[in-house]
């Protein structure tokens, strides 16, 4: 059974900011994510996806589509 909760962009941004600001307190980014996710009310995997998207949007990450590129592609379809 899945829980289909939608989080506002503000909540997502705050959660990502919490991960980025707290990373020095943990051994790894994953440990940080696992600590913060329950406080937000999402799974660690969901929070990890938000962090990766933030990294792409700010010029880092794995070369995937930025949020703006994703939106543009959606408009073209």
Image: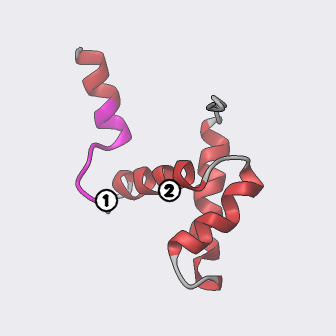
Pick the residue in front: 68 or 12.
12
Residue under the image location 25 percent in, 25 percent down: 73
**Which residue was labeled with disc 2?**
48
**Which residue was labeled with disc 1?**
59
Q: Residue furthest right?
A: 39
Which label's residue is closer to the chain start, 2 or 1? 2
Residue under the image location 50 percent in, 50 percent down: 50
Marks 2,1: beta carbons within 8 A: no
Pick the residue in front: 3 or 64.
3
Instruction: Tell me if residue 39 comes above or below residue 29 in the rendering.
Output: above
Magenta span contains residue 58: no
User: What span is colored magenta in the figure?
Assistant: 61-70
Main structural element of the magenta stretch: helix, strand or loop?
loop
Left or right? Give the position of 61 relative to 53.
left
Q: Quadrant of residue 6?
A: top right
Q: Quadrant of the N terminus?
A: top right
Q: Quadrant of residue 11?
A: top right
């Amino acid at each position: 059974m899945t829980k289909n909760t939608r989080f506002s962009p503000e909540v997502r941004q705050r959660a990502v900011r919490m991960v980025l600001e707290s990373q020095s307190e943990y051994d790894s980014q994953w440990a940080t994510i696992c600590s913060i996710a329950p406080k937000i009310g999402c799974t660690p995997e969901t929070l990890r996806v938000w962090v990766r998207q933030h990294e792409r949007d700010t010029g880092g990450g794995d070369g995937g589509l930025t949020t703006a590129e994703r939106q543009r592609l959606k408009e073209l379809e």
